[in-house]
Image (cartoon, coloured by chain):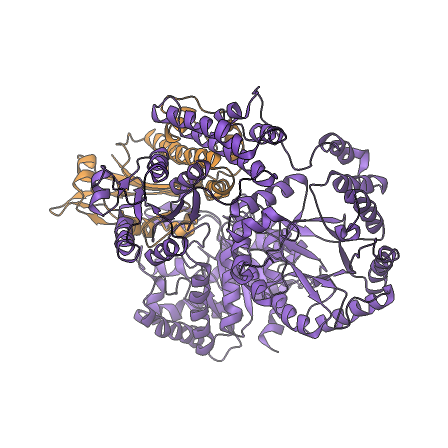
């Protein structure tokens, strides 16, 4: 894959086991209602990914990620031995947020299932991106702002580095949360 | 020639990319390009100069992201003035226009995001007013990927300045804006608000934008703009390059110019070579004349409805007149019930929904805008706010992301002076009632005259036939046997004499008569035959819906009778048009239906059971035992959250039947609980689940929503006298707001119990911030609340005390 880019990502089949987990049914049987939700969700999911590679270096204060510096020890542990990172943002689009909002007023059960479907969709997208990217370069497990001691405030730098407002139509609120909410930013090293 | 005339007069060549040019000049990633207006003015002037030298007629200031969300208030003025001066400096001595450039605010507007649309409007308005003061010739709103924000920017432009406005959107590869609007809807909404030109920019190269541009040209009466990227980006040696060279770019642009695009330029990746190429093409081509599309059309954020073809069905059900349950719902701001009515009408086949909240005890000025906002989250149908209060109407139109059907104006000067300016500013087609200071005229001829006067007055506001739908007023036929005929005659006269669109509140004809649907549907058919453009009617009435299909089939508008046959199967006369039952499986009792989470079955079984048993008995013997059973299963982890919620929904459906029945338990029996997601937090799914379950278990819930200030919570507790408050927070960053809310409650509402929940909390943390109880899930919250019923509210619990 290119060292940077923005792509519409093709449809990915849903992982029902993961949806069950996010919906609070560990190993549980999912209701038939889920199939209805999956059909409704299919038409509104818009997978898009933006990414860019940077060299990473270990400094006295912590890490120079190429687009920002951080003192995160947890990320440093994750990237130990790596020379490069790919910074990426993956989004399933605003459609699922719209469905969650709609059904939170009409059917909380469906709202909760759409929430779970959304979580699964964007995680599956991240996995698909890392797998595709990792075909040529085996990657370490991805790591996101907000994990461990990696501060959420790094999102500001991620937004600037990937130009996410324009590239993916994302917005970052004062509370450092991203809209659409079914969006993940992450770093994976090699 | 004025700037507005110049926008309409022929070709206008715009500039090329600014951002990419500055990156080439050394702008660092993350550095704000707008700061260069002051720190590197020579670079900015050089870029402007290159476009002026290439032949541009209109250049855009380097102000794409300049607003108070990204810059300190104190910096804005100086930056706007510097940006306009830099552009002016480049066009000295030449007749080149300077446009104040504005991109997205960087905020997502509520309800999708967390920013109040009024904040976005005022942020844009501030910069636009500065731009006019600094001497910009027009406002250029660009790269909008959300129709709500494009609309907010256009409102701001009208309020902040008197300059012409061009609005340009950025579309995805699926041909829609990020938030779902297609080109037809974008054109309908923004042209309706009075944009001087509309178009597309950025997104893609000119070849892949062709379909979108052609849609614009098909629907727009204003000039159309195209300002694409130089194809698709890729990275070479660490630098972003685009794949279309000037020749290929210009060749693709030539075909769009021949198709009718008149304002052209380039966006990301284009430079002065592209603009010079376009200049040559424009000198060889002739502008395609503008076409007045004469469309009478309204839209929601994602859907357009036009008048003049099949009669448009407008659902009348959201109107409290004569509806006890709806009145109660509006009074209690129980939106779930009202939104359910909306969805039922949509499923039954309505194309537009009337929204009327006029009932005593509610404040229409705040309730109508709120309900309009809520309705947009559950339905894609265009809405028709219905109010005689201009303040309520303006509030509704401001919050409506679309082009509304405005119900209504009449022939009195007072009404016209209030309503026409609103339609002009916010866009909208207006229902015009043919009555005036002297009341409703008795004859068709006089109603036609009122219509004629309304149209003449509308023209003085720049509105015309396509902006009005005349309602010649369906009257109660049992009170005056000739009345139905007069209305039909007036309808025909308005069609033929004024070439006007028409609408009727059909159901009015049958007041006082039995079997109203029968005479309503016959009258509806007669009116359709007289050329009715729209009907305000009850879409849940099978006879009314069937009359519509019958009429189309009989008039050759349903080739092969496909729609008629589908309708005949779908709408049988014994079944209400709105009920779409999809559940399968056998259950015999209400209790079982609730336990299995079957919503429609629970409602149907409850309806049947109410014929023989009291509502209260059903609650005590069927619903509550079922919920207890499910709740215990959840606590023992034999069943999970989705099942619990589905049971709760089934119980709600049953309660709804009991409320609607004669044997409804009088008043509210359960103790009251005030619920809120705390200030700064917008995650309310958990809180909504708690609300649903508490209501199921018989508590009266006051739901304050999300992002609620401590003061609002305290005020609600004082007002309702609630003994229990539930607060939720998902984020660590909002726990302090929760703590502050509890502190205020302790001070202002002594004795009230506070339970808290949310992902970041635990019993210790809850105790630390002063809560009485931490509920790890919704059932725990219910169990805690139930102790209120058993004991006295001042009981302190062992969990945290």
Q: Position of residue A152 (x, y in %)?
A: 27, 47
**Chain letter of the purple region:** B
Of residues B491 and B283, the one drawn nearer to the viewer in this rendering: B491
Q: Give the camera-side residue of B478 and B248.
A: B478
State whether residue B681 is above or below residue B46.
above
> How far from the left and from the top, in percent, is residue B717?
37, 53
> Residue A52, image x and y in percent?
33, 43
Q: Colour of chain A?
A: orange
Left/right placement of residue B675 relative to residue B181 reads: left
Query: Residue at left 37%, top 29%?
Result: A24
Q: Is residue B57 above or below residue B673?
A: below
* Figure quadrant of the C terminus of chain A: top left
In terms of image quadrants, where is residue B785?
Answer: top left
Q: Nearer the viewer, residue B603 or B45?
A: B603
The quarter of the image holding the N terminus of chain A is top left
Residue at 55% from the left image edge and 44% from the top image edge:
B337
* B616 or B102, nearer to the observer: B616
- Report the residue that reaches farthest toward the bottom: B93
Q: Could you tell whether B160 is left or right of B418 in the image?
A: left
- Count how many numbered circles sit on residues in the image: 0
Residue B755 coordinates in the image, percent (x, y): 31, 43
Q: Is residue B751 visible?
A: yes
Compared across the picture, whether B133 is left or right of B291 comes to left
- Is residue A13 shown to the viewer in this render? no
């Amino acid at each position: 894959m290119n060292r940077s880019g923005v792509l519409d990502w093709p449809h990915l089949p849903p992982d029902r086991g993961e949806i069950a987990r996010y919906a609070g049914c560990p190993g549980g049987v999912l209701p038939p209602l889920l199939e209805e939700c999956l059909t409704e969700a299919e038409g509104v999911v818009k997978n898009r990914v933006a990414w860019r590679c940077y060299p990473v270096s270990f400094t006295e204060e912590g890490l120079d990620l190429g687009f920002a510096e951080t003192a995160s020890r947890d990320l440093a542990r994750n990237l130990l031995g790596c020379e490069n990172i790919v910074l990426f943002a993956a989004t399933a689009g605003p459609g699922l947020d719209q469905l969650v909002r709609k059904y939170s007023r009409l059917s909380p059960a469906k709202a909760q299932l759409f929430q779970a479907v959304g979580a699964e969709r964007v995680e599956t997208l991240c996995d698909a991106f890392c797998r595709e990217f990792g075909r040529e370069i085996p990657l370490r497990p991805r790591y996101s702002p907000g994990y461990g001691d990696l501060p959420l405030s790094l999102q500001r730098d991620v937004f600037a580095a990937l130009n996410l407002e324009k590239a993916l139509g994302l917005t970052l609120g004062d509370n450092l949360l991203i809209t659409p909410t079914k969006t993940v930013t992450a770093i994976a090293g090699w | 020639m004025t700037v507005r005339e110049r926008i309409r007069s022929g070709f206008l060549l715009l500039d090329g990319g600014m951002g990419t040019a500055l990156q080439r000049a050394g702008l660092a990633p993350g550095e704000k390009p707008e700061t260069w207006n002051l720190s590197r003015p020579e670079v900015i002037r050089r870029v402007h100069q290159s476009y002026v030298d290439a032949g541009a007629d209109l250049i855009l200031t380097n102000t794409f992201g300049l607003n108070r969300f990204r810059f300190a208030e104190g910096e804005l003025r100086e930056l706007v003035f510097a940006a306009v001066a830099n552009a002016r400096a480049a066009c000295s001595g030449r007749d080149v226009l300077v446009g104040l450039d504005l991109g997205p605010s960087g905020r997502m507007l509520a309800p999708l995001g967390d920013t109040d649309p009024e904040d976005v409007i005022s942020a844009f308005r501030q910069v636009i007013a500065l731009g006019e003061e600094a001497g910009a010739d027009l406002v250029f709103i660009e790269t909008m990927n959300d129709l709500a924000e494009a609309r907010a920017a256009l409102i701001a432009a009208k309020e902040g300045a008197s300059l012409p406005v061009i609005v340009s959107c950025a579309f995805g590869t699926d041909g829609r804006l990020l938030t779902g609007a297609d080109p037809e809807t974008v054109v309908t909404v923004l042209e309706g608000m009075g944009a001087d030109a509309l178009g597309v920019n950025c997104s893609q190269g000119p070849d892949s934008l062709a379909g979108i541009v052609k849609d614009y040209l098909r629907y727009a009466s204003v000039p159309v703009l195209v300002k694409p990227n130089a194809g698709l980006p890729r990275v070479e040696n660490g630098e972003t390059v685009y794949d279309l060279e000037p020749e290929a770019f210009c060749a693709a642009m030539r075909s769009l110019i021949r198709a009718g695009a008149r304002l052209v330029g380039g966006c990301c990746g284009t430079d002065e070579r592209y603009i010079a190429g376009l200049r040559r093409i424009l000198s060889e081509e002739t502008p395609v004349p503008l076409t007045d599309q004469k469309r009478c059309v309204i839209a929601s954020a994602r859907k357009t409805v036009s008048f003049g073809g099949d009669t448009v069905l407008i659902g009348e059900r959201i109107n409290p007149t004569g509806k006890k349950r709806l009145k109660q719902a509006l009074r209690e701001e129980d939106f779930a019930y009202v939104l359910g009515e909306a969805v039922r009408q949509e499923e039954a086949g309505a194309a537009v929904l009337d929204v009327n909240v006029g009932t005593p005890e509610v404040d229409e000025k705040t309730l109508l805008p709120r309900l309009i906002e809520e309705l947009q989250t559950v339905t894609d149908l265009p809405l028709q706010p219905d109010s005689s209060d201009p303040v309520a109407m303006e509030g509704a139109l401001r919050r409506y992301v679309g082009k509304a059907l405005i119900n209504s104006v009449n022939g009195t000067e007072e009404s016209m002076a209030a309503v026409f300016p609103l339609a002009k500013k916010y866009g909208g087609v207006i229902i015009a009632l043919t009555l005036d200071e002297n009341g409703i005229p008795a004859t068709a001829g006089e109603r036609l005259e009122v219509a004629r006067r309304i149209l003449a007055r509308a023209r003085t506001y720049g509105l015309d036939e396509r902006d009005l739908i005349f309602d010649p007023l369906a009257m109660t036929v049992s009170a005056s046997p000739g009345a139905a005929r007069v209305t039909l005659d007036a309808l025909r006269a308005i069609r033929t004499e004024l070439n006007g669109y028409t609408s009727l509140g059909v159901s009015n004809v049958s007041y006082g008569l039995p079997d109203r649907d029968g005479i309503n549907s016959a009258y509806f058919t007669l009116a359709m035959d007289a050329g009715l453009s729209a009907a305000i009617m009850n879409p849940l009435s099978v006879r009314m819906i069937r009359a519509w299909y019958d009429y189309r089939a009989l008039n050759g508008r349903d080739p092969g009778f496909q729609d008629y046959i589908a309708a005949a199967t779908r709408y049988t006369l014994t079944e209400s048009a709105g009920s779409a039952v999809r559940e399968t499986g056998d259950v015999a009792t209400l209790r079982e239906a609730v336990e299995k989470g079957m919503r429609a079955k629970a409602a149907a079984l409850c309806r049947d059971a109410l014929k023989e048993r009291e509502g209260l008995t059903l609650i005590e013997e069927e619903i509550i035992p079922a919920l207890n059973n499910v709740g215990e299963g959840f606590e023992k982890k034999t069943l999970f959250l989705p099942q619990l919620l589905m049971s709760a929904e089934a119980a709600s459906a049953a309660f709804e039947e009991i409320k609607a029945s004669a044997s409804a338990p009088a008043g509210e029996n359960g103790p009251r609980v005030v619920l809120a997601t705390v200030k700064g937090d917008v995650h309310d799914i958990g809180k909504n689940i708690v609300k649903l379950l508490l209501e199921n278990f018989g508590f009266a819930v006051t739901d304050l929503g999300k992002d609620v200030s401590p003061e609002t919570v305290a005020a609600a507790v004082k007002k309702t006298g609630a003994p229990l408050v539930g607060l939720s927070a998902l984020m660590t960053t909002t726990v302090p707001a929760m703590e502050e809310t509890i502190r205020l409650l302790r001070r202002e509402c002594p004795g009230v119990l506070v339970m808290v929940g949310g992902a970041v909390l635990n019993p210790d943390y809850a105790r630390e911030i002063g809560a009485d109880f931490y509920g790890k899930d919704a059932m725990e919250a219910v169990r805690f609340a139930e102790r209120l019923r058993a004991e006295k509210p001042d009981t302190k619990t062992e969990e945290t005390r």
